[in-house]
Image (spheres, grey):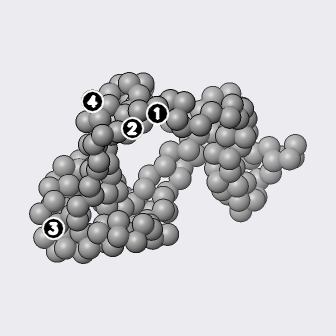
Amino acid sequence: MRTLISKDNKTKCSQSFQINNETVTDNKLISNEFCNYFSNIGRLQTSNIPNLGNKYQSYLSELEPKSMLLSPTDPNEIISILRSLKSKTSQGQDGVSTQLLQQLENQLNVSISILINKSRESGTVPDIMKIAKIVPIYKNQGQNLIKKMQANITPSKFIKSVRTGCSQPGYAFLNDTSKLNAHRFGFRKKTLYN
């Protein structure tokens, strides 16, 4: 049906890629190269940014008179967060959907609030919470070049709920004190890119 109405425009991924000037068709080698590329892209990009020697005081000259308190979360706040997420059946790498989380909100809210509070207290984030499903998407010309692909990153839906609970107080403080640049769109609600 999608083909008939011209909606089937997904570009199929190449079965071979150029790696070190060689055409490679071995799926394991291609997978490892994607992993290597997407794991190091941040470091590669930042290495191209010149160090101007600016200290943060050059752009944050005034001290903020307000302070931020990260009070412990509670099960009721977790239920509110879970209900605020879009109810979808799509799953992250853990196989859990937001729809499932919402259906189990009364069974999970205490555990999630404990996890968030322990993470805040210790200042650490468990490694399992840093895992995401990364799907390479063909971006433009050079379909068989790994560096021409972009990553579609899907974190675990469970982790998304935890991250939302952890970030809301900090985001509210930054927004209320006007510390966010007007052109910073990445995670801000009601902006062009969100």
Q: What is the x, y in percent for residue 62?
A: 41, 33
The alpha-carbon separation of the residues under discs 2 and 4 comes to 28 Å
Question: Residue at horizontal 14%, vertical 55%?
Answer: 80
Relative height, residue 71 to residue 61 (above, below): below
Residue in front for this viewpoint, 128 or 28: 128
Asked whether the residues under the numbered discs 2 and 4 touch, taking CB atoms below 8 Å apart as contact, a structural biologist would say no
Give the quarter of the figure containing the N terminus: top left
Location of residue 8 (image quadrant)? top left
Look at label 3 and name its amino acid.
Pro
Regarding residue 104, the answer to whether it shows in the image is: no
Question: Residue at horizontal 81%, vertical 47%?
Answer: 19
For residue 190, which numbered disc appears in the image?
4
Q: Which residue is mark 1?
A: 60
- Provide the secondary structure element on which disc 1 rests: loop
For residue 11, which numbered disc appears in the image?
none
Residue in front for this viewpoint, 72 or 21: 72
The alpha-carbon separation of the residues under discs 4 and 3 comes to 27 Å
The alpha-carbon separation of the residues under discs 3 and 2 comes to 34 Å
